[in-house]
Image (cartoon, helix red, strand yellow):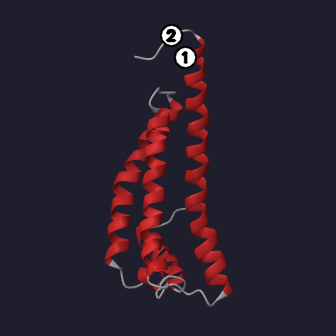
Amino acid sequence: MTVSIAEWQATCILFLKEYGKADVRWLYFDPTIVSVEILTAVLDGSLALFLVYAIVKEKYYRHFIQITLCVCELYGDWMTFCPEWVTGSPNLNTSNWLYFWVYLVFFNGVWVLVPALLLWQSWVELKKIHHRGAGSGRKFQ
């Protein structure tokens, strides 16, 4: 099965329109949302590719990249939703069960839960590395 660029773009537009029923900022291209998403696409996208490389090649800097990417994603989540919470969520449809609990809470919760779990994974791995180094009698310089 092949999908043309036009079909892919049409599908993306449909997703944006549907999600826009829960968060209207996506329908009128809110400057804050657009700014965060540009940063996410460029910086986080590049970091994600670099992270995949670091994982596959078992590079020593894997957890540094993973932590950086996770913090960037959590910051983007915060900058997307904190202004809405502070102003009483005027652009979020919190009155509809589907839009609130599925679109806003569940789907956006994934973008918080996954980075949080990966941060925890990096914490545990770095702690193990530290204890192995400390147990060898050597001091870190």
Report the number of discs: 2
**Image vertical order of residue 76 relative to residue 33, above or below:** above
Tag 2 secondary structure: loop
**In the foreground, 101 or 45:** 101
**In the foreground, 135 or 71:** 135
Residue type highlighted by circle 1: Gly
- Say which residue appears at 38% left-offset and 48% top-offset: 46
Residue 81 is situated, as x and y percent measured from the top left of the image, at 47, 72
Within 10 Å of the Cα at label 1, are there few (<14), some (14-19), or many (20+) other Cα atoms?
Answer: few
Residue 94 is situated, as x and y percent measured from the top left of the image, at 59, 86
Residue 65: quadrant of the picture: top left
Report the side of 71 relative to 130 (left or right).
left
Reading the image, the residue beneath label 1 is 133
- Say which residue appears at 52% left-offset and 32% top-offset: 56
- Say which residue appears at 51% left-offset and 84% top-offset: 92
Residue type highlighted by circle 2: Arg
Residue 38: quadrant of the picture: bottom left
| Residue 124 is at least partly visible in this image | yes
**Image vertical order of residue 95 relative to residue 85, above or below:** below
Q: Earlier in the sequence, mark 2 or mark 1?
A: 1
Q: Give the label on residue 53, or none.
A: none
**In the foreground, 110 or 94:** 94
Report the side of 102 relative to 77 (left or right).
right
Tag 1 secondary structure: helix
Reading the image, the residue beneath label 2 is 138
- Say which residue appears at 60% left-offset and 69% top-offset: 107
Report the side of 66 relative to 94 (left or right).
left
| Residue 7 is at least partly visible in this image | no
Contact flag, marks 2 and 1 (Cβ < 8 Å): yes
